[in-house]
Amino acid sequence: MQADGKSTTTAVVLAAGLGTRMKSDLPKVLHPVAGRPMVGHVLATLDGIGADHAVVVVGDGMDALAAAVRPHATAVQKERLGTGHAVLAARDFIQTHPADDLIVLYGDTPLITTDTLRAMLAARRSPARPGVVVLGFEPADPGPYGRLILDGDGALTAIVEAKDATSEQLAVTLCNSGVMVIDGARALDWLDRIGNRNAKGEYYLTDIVAIARADGAAAAVVIGDADEVLGVNSRVELAEAETIAQQRLRARAMAGGATLIDPQTVYLSWDTELGRDVVIGPNVVFGPGVRIADNVEIRAFCHIEGATVAAGTVIGPFARLRPGADLGTGVHIGNFVEIKASQLGEGTKVNHLSYVGDSIVGAGVNIGAGTITCNYDGHVKSKTVIGDHAFIGSNTALVAPVTVGAGAIVGAGSAISKNVAAGALAVTRADQKEVKGWADRFNAKRRKDKQDRKKEG
Ligand code: UD1
Ligand code: MG
């Protein structure tokens, strides 16, 4: 217990699995769901319940995974000898971070919620003071899952792995999710007593229930939603997890005051921030790092990533905002416009077919159709600066580094490679030439030629 009476928690996240069925060079738990690695979701959920300490159990040689979860601690399970053995790989961490509750979670089970973990911690405080609380669920197909064996009073007496179960036990539909909360003071003692005499020859964490009971402690079950405990072992299950995560994020966005016209076609990231009265059209995709303020309209078919959008802005249809796009209040971004690493001031408009990259654009600027900031010379990226209320004519190439002063006008079709002073006109196209009557003479001759050919034919 902490001084304020709050119970303390240490969590062990198992992630030593090889993820062979993913057929991937990336460790399984680093595959993203809603734009964040699966193990990142689990660690964030632990943060959400205010867990005091967490350690991730990784396999031997999984250095990339250890680096990815830093600053969280890792422990290495040298050989995969079962879930009980995996928790004990974190023995040192558990000993040096003693807590009232030891939570065991899985890096490949990203959808577990803070509500469920809180319910499990609350169950530990229930009058029976269970030494072990297991998260159970009713899967559509209990097949390979461990079965939760309850006595007549509904107390958990044992978990039996499918491979070790009798046909009577296999008929039980309440299954083990794997997630557990264990009395922190007794966990290591019980874990040390787990043996490996079973069908798989593994140290089953699940044996801890019978061991705790034999030691006079009670065990209890909290029943969770099957969606929450979906474990990802394949790309198909990764897609299933993504679907569930997206449903939750869409519901959260709408609960927060955003309209999603066709929610099933809007893809959000774990960290997408949407203000009130944001309206999102069909087929919009949000990558990580997006913040959208109030009253923004995002029309159909936009792709937005790493962008900050101020209130009252209108984006799309068919626009792309890339990382570092920072749009001021009331900006208009129209169709087939790409913005990258650029600040656009209040009320600025880029309505058609443009690329604005590495730029600082002032307020009230009008960027005409087909304008391109030529920010890359094949070696380095350079900046374009456009002052307030400047007007950039259609089909302008702004060859960076270049500055267009406030209130300046650039004539359509210009290639601007020198700075333009404030209030000036810059135009680089050749002067227009006009030949009186030329078109009439040309057309008359062509028509006559055609008639002559017909007569001959
Ligand atoms: C485990 C449970 C089973 C439960 C099921 C839920 C045991 C003995 N069985 O079975 O009751 O219904 O999960 O999905 O616990 N891991 C390691 N190191 C190991 C072994 C496993 O890190 O040595 C990790 C795996 O990466 C995986 C998790 O622990 O994320 C579960 O291991 P797995 O082998 O899938 O256990 P199951 O046989 O599915
Ligand atoms: Mg499994």
Image (spheres, rainbow, N blue to C red):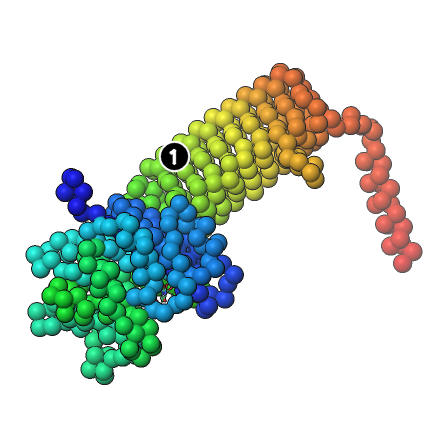
Ligand 1: quadrant of the figure: bottom left
User: Quadrant of residue 189 in the image?
Assistant: bottom left
- Give the mark count: 1
Q: Position of residue 142 (x, y in %)?
A: 28, 73
Residue at image position (61%, 28%) is: 384
- The residue indicated by pointer 1 is 293
In the image, 82 versus 293, the foreground residue is 82
In the image, 197 versus 160, the foreground residue is 197
Q: Position of residue 101 (x, y in %)?
A: 21, 53
Q: Which amino acid does label 1 sit on?
A: Ala
| Mark 1 element type | loop
Up-down relation of residue 58 to residue 370 (above or below): below
Up-down relation of residue 286 to residue 82 (above or below): above
Locate the C terminus and report the quarter of the image it occupies: bottom right
User: Quadrant of residue 209 in the image?
Assistant: bottom left
User: Quadrant of residue 381 in the image?
Assistant: top right
Q: Where is residue 269 in the image (x, y as percent from the top left)?
A: 41, 48
Residue at image position (33%, 73%) is: 202
Is 192 situated left or right of 129 in this image?
Answer: right
